[in-house]
Image: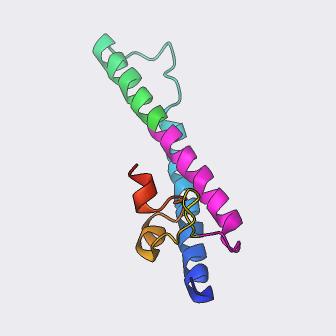
Amino acid sequence: MTNEDRERLRKTMTDKVAGLKEELIELKELTQPEAPDCAIGRVSRMDAINNRSVNEAAIRKKQLKLSKLGQALEKIDSPDFGKCSRCGQEIPWGRIAIMPESTLCIRCASR
């Protein structure tokens, strides 16, 4: 991986981190509890509970991706960045470009 590739990837990852942080703020606002004195019907309350659980799952997924991207950003200048943590082979640029948080090559990830 060239230095130019690393810088391009660093920018992409930084942009993804910023986007994820914004999405997390929005999702957290959607998961605020309903006020008990809020006059909504039983069905509407059940919908709100269901939507809240869906949003909480999305929050967990985005927090995990944010954490993995943060770890990848910390390691981007390491000589081991872009190498499979299981077999040690180079992870193809196409995979790294799409999923910069990848730590496994396609072959090892599919096992």
Residue 8's spot in the image, x, y percent?
55, 81
Q: Residue at x 37, y 29 (%)?
A: 51
Quadrant for the N terminus in the image: bottom right
Asked if 67 appears above or below 77 in the picture, the reply is: above
Q: Is residue 76 visible?
A: yes
Given residues 52 and 8, the one toward you in this image is 8
Residue 44 part of the magenta segment: no
- The number of numbered discs placed on residues in the rendered structure image is 0
Asked if 5 appears above or below 55 in the picture, the reply is: below
Residue 86's spot in the image, x, y percent?
56, 56
Q: Is residue 97 left or right of residue 10?
A: left
Residue 84's spot in the image, x, y percent?
55, 63
Which span is picked out in magenta?
Answer: 58-81
Q: Main secondary structure of the magenta part?
A: helix
Q: Residue at x 55, y 59 (%)?
A: 103
Q: Residue at x 51, y 47 (%)?
A: 62
Asked if 62 appears above or below 51 in the picture, the reply is: below
